[in-house]
Amino acid sequence: MKLSEISENIKIAFEAMSVNKLRSLLASLGVVIGISFVILMGWVLSGLDQALEDTFNIIGTDMLYIDKWDWAGGRNWKKVRQRKNITYNQATEFCEKIKNAELAIPNAREFGYRIKYKNEEFQGMTFIGTKWEHSLTPAGATFIGRHFTQFEDDIGSNVIVLGYKVNQALMVEGDPLGQYVKIEGRKFLVIGVIKKQGTMLFDFVDNQCFMPIKSFQSVFGKSGRSVSIAIKAGSINNLDEVRAESEGLMRQIRNIKPGEENDFSINETKAFESTVEVLRLSVWSVGIGMTVLSFLVGIIGIMNIMFVSVTERTKEIGIRKAVGAKKRTIWMQFIIEAAILSFVGAIIAFIGCSALVYLVATFLPKFVPETAFLSPVLPYELLLIASFVSIFVGMLAGLIPAVRGANLDPVEALRREN
Amino acid sequence: MDLNEENKNGKPIIDIEHIAKIYQMGSEFVHAIRDITLKIYKNDYLAIMGPSGSGKSTLMNIIGCLDTPTKGKYLFKDMDVSEMTDNDLASIRNKEIGFVFQTFNLLARSSSLKNVELPLIYAGVGKSERDDRAMKAMENVGLADRVNHKPNELSGGQRQRVAIARALVTEPSIILADEPTGNLDSKTGLEIMNLFNELWKAGNTIIVVTHEEEVARFAKRIIKLRDGLIENDSFNHHQRITNDTSTTSSVTNQ
Ligand SMILES: Nc1ncnc2c1ncn2[C@@H]1O[C@H](COP(=O)(O)OP(=O)(O)OP(=O)(O)O)[C@@H](O)[C@H]1O
Ligand SMILES: [Mg+2]
């Protein structure tokens, strides 16, 4: 195929489209909608992937969490609820005895409490009593200030490390370090703020505040809750060994007889993969049906307009053939026209979606915080995908009309009036 | 009189033997061409005449490789047309044939220069050479100042000149004109015939289909068709030859 023919055909396609702008636009409407679905699906899915990755980064891929609760959720909900709490003593015993882990820290947690700063009060806070080693885990990295020290931990100082959002809410502008907050009537010194970590899956982490576990117990009481244990294996390779040891050790501490089921769960980041997988699947199943449907409409729309185009330009085809256009030249002329028609539809879709995505990602999270994982810009890969898909769809839609045009008998075609 | 004997300047460009073209209309067969044998040599100037429906256009389309005969043999420059693929035929039309139609058949949305360039695009000629050659063809038909006009901005005679420029631009072996003056008034028609006359004198081979004796008078040889057969094939002893090089003013001098 000669270059002059291809560039000629592209020019013809744009000419033909500019003559019938509105008609071309309507013809590509199906493609616009179909490509929009592809783009929006890709956008949500890539947001989910990012959220998953962020979550891994917070939790740490080499981390295990022993808990009464099972992160994977669902399955044995009733059974899980009937489990006995993991007591503080059991957790401490575990942390002292485990050998292969790099770190093991008890975490006691209380939900739905209030925090007071000056005259402002905030509700729905989560407080976590933990050990100083929490600062060595990904979840304990501070943004400003510092985590509490081993000494503060040992004596049970009333110091607190705020979650990112807690800090934002309390001290909108000022420096939080050195300020005092009140929890259940007790004063705590703010010594640091945890890095922003929230993702869709783990949004609440930014609302948590950390304090030495002794201080925690003196505020919220010693018993009556289940304590979880965070274990850092040190590396992913070490994970299986640490998991096995943890299970054995915990069974021993909890006096579980051989053959009996565990009455605790060992959670890890894998649990989130399955959660995301479920979300991903539901996005797919909703999206793919609509996408296929709108592409069908798109293909029919373009095919239809191309048939009209071939009919309207029968005389032109005759003229071109008379001066030496080959079948494949005519064929290509219409295939290119259909592809460009569809491609323009994709560009319109991409521009429209870019605006939509920007608006949604900017404003929706203000009302629905769970959607904060959505990015305000479309990944550029989506532009490539949309281009390829639309060109493919256009060529597919143009195929039959193009073949019909190419196979026209030149003598017949020239006889036409128009 | 056998004109083929007279033309001894080499092999014929077109060598047609006993061709027929039969159309099927439902259960009926239409014999557009029954049996025609014809040789055309370089620098021939042939007029094909005959009543409506006698097969003139059909013969022209076959000669121009737009159509293929149902029966018989057609050699174009010694190549057997019946064995050619669609691509080969397109290539012959592109390089060897220049068509001129009664209804001009120009692309309405393109400028006249663009129309003239079209065969060169399909021949794969590069942009700058294309422009040069199309420009020269436009000069040859006296329309150098109308290159940017679209067909609907030109008179009928000018449109036909653009069509002739398009037919000439590839320097084809033969120019086929099917009633080129049919849509023009007699004065403009004569201008077009003068142009063909010039082209013939410059060495081109021309076939013109026409109803009009006035037009046929310009040809060197006149063929009369009837019912798909050649009724008469004779040398034109009264060939009208003009001397002007200026194509537009020539009519008034006659
Ligand atoms: N595609 C076709 N199908 C059926 N019959 C056809 C077809 N094309 C031409 N014919 C018939 O073949 C015969 C010759 O047609 P052609 O067009 O060659 O005549 P013509 O001599 O050019 O006539 P005119 O002077 O009116 O242009 C006519 O009877 C016509 O009806
Ligand atoms: Mg005719």
Image: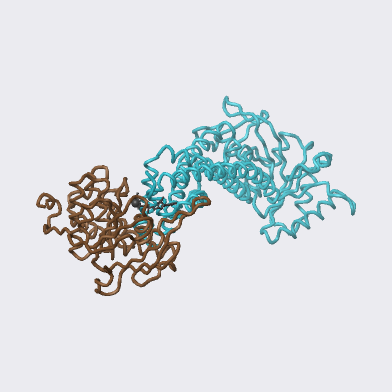
Chain colours: A cyan, B brown
Front residue of this view, candidates A56 and B243: B243
Image quadrant where one finds the N terminus of chain A: bottom left
Front residue of this view, candidates B195 and A373: B195
Image quadrant where one finds the C terminus of chain A: top left
Q: Going 71% across and 36% down the picture, which residue do you hit?
A: A110
Instruction: Tell me, yes or no, if residue B200 can be seen here.
Output: yes
Residue B140, quarter of the rendered image: bottom left
B80 to A210, vertically: above or below? below
Front residue of this view, candidates B199 and A390: B199
Residue A226, quarter of the rendered image: top right
Judge from the rendering whether residue A225 lies leftward or rightward of residue B42; answer left or right: right
The spot of residue A209 in percent (x, y) is 63, 38
User: Which residue occupies the extreme top position in the image?
Assistant: A119
Judge from the rendering whether residue A168 lies leftward or rightward of residue A68; answer left or right: left
Front residue of this view, candidates A244 and A398: A398
Q: Going 17% across and 53% down the picture, which residue do you hit?
A: B142
Q: How many marks?
A: 0
The spot of residue B248 in percent (x, y) is 14, 51
Judge from the rendering whether residue B220 lies leftward or rightward of residue A197; answer left or right: left
B130 to A340, vertically: above or below? below
Instruction: Tell me, yes or no, if residue A39 can be seen here.
Output: no
B232 to A360, vertically: above or below? below
Residue B32, quarter of the rendered image: bottom left
The spot of residue B69 in percent (x, y) is 42, 62
User: Which residue occupies the extreme left position in the image?
Assistant: B253
The spot of residue B144 in percent (x, y) is 18, 52
